Amino acid sequence: MLALGLLSAAAAATRGAIEIYPASARAVASPLYRVRADGRAVFTEAFTDVHYAHFSASGRVAISISTGAPITGYSIQPRFNAPTAKVAGDSLEFILDRPRQLVVTINGAQRLFLFVDAINPHAPRPDDPGVRSIADFGVDATGARLETKRIQDAIDRVAAAKGVLYFPPGTYLTGTLALKSDLTLYLAGGATLLGSIDRDDYPVDAGFKESDMKNDPEHWSNKGADMTYSRLLLIDRAHNVRLAGRGVIDGQGRLIRNQGKPANLLRIRDSAQVTVEGLILRDAAAWNTHVLYSRDVTIRDVKIINDRSVANSDGIDPDSAQDLPVVLDVVPRLPNCRIGEQLDERCERGIAESREVFHRGRRGELARGRAVAKGEIPHLGRARGEGEADELGVVRVD
């Protein structure tokens, strides 16, 4: 009995802590999958033709994925170092010994993305010195009211103080926001920065005409050279900017693109010392993350989920950028594509041309520096100049 007790205590000691995040009020529960971590239910969301569960953990975690039907087959990707799983009735069970990003398919059904992040012991708290909560600025957290002006005011004020703007769990509806130098914008798990579904909330850059497949089909183009000059989040001519957390940035891209508006989710332009870390970047109307003429940009542990029915929904597009580490564990893969992109069946090509590059009259530069990743990263670099672009294709990093 004593030996059994010691074994049970040792097994319990190997278990780690778990952080489970509240689901958004607008989230749709998966009808196919139910996920549990160490016996605790983890909300599993359905989004277009995929499903995903997201939580943070440290140490060993027992995962159970139930389907409600007998399991006749399954796959776990990436296959390299995939956990050993067993079937128990209608459940697939395995142990994670560390944070992982996995793609699970059961009985040939739609894919389940399992996003398990590391617990961040240094995550900011609203009462920490230098941290301001967005709640302090009277911003609605239900998603019922457009809050672009209030959120932008909060960004400006917190950046001026070189502080941290903290978003607690909730839904924050907004149009285009400009992030400023010396700012950390932190989305806690359960917080969603939600893009407006009104195209007028995404202004176009002055002096540029954006392609509009709905309202100006005669001059519409899906080429990057003339396509998109609007976005949800803009980091422009800024330095020392950090966009981080365990929350979600959701562009509601399909609804925006159906109005003819090809807005990026995030554009980083003419900036330096920028970090994007830990977030879920979801549903861009075009080009999820565009890095243009910037340097020292680090993209780490992001989870990108785009709608395959939306044209040009690339993952990460570096454009004449320098020193761009992209640090990823695994990228959810669509058939023949990477980083949840849709590229008109040409996923192996480089990024689409940006007319903004050509307008500057500068010779091409190669997106260069170091890339630290496992898997395949599309659009990691492309040489440009004189209106021409030499494609580098997909870069594989071991």
Image (cartoon, rainbow, N blue to C red):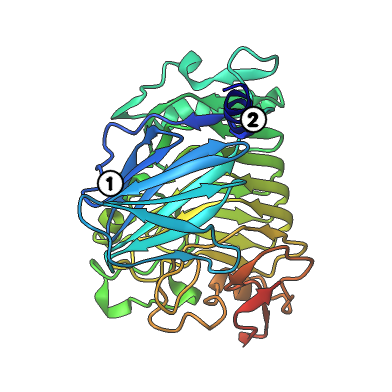
The C terminus lies in quadrant? bottom right
Label disc, if present, on residue 70 of the rendered structure: none
- Front residue of 313/262: it is 313
Q: Using the rendered image of the protein, determine whether residue 391 is visible from the camera's viewpoint.
A: yes
Residue at 62% x, 47% y: name it: 276
- Front residue of 61/5: it is 5
Q: In this view, does 276 lie above or below 154?
A: below
Where residue 51 sits: x, y (%)? 33, 53
Residue at 38% x, 29% y: name it: 22
Q: In this view, does 148 lie above or below 255?
A: above
SS at circle 2: helix
Where residue 132 sits: x, y (%)? 59, 18
- Front residue of 57/275: it is 57
Badge 2 crowding class, 10 Å Cα cut-off, few under 14, some 14 to 19, many 20 or more, is few
Distance of label 2 from label 1 (alpha carbons): 55 Å
Horizontal arrangement in the rendering, residue 105 relative to residue 322 (left or right)? left
Counting residues from the N terminus, which is met first, the one under dot 2 or under dot 1?
A: 2
SS at circle 1: loop
User: Do tag 2 and tag 1 residues touch (Cβ < 8 Å)?
Assistant: no
Residue at 27% x, 66% y: name it: 72
Q: What residue type is labelled 2?
A: Ala
Q: Is residue 4 above or below residue 323?
A: above
Q: Using the rendered image of the protein, determine whether residue 179 is visible from the camera's viewpoint.
A: no
Residue assigned mark 1:
198
Q: What residue type is labelled 1?
A: Asp
Horizontal arrangement in the rendering, residue 278 relative to residue 103 (left or right)? right
Residue at 60% x, 83% y: name it: 393
- Figure quadrant of residue 13: top right
The N terminus lies in quadrant? top right
Where residue 35 sits: x, y (%)? 36, 43
Residue assigned mark 2:
10
Horizontal arrangement in the rendering, residue 5 relative to residue 35 (left or right)? right
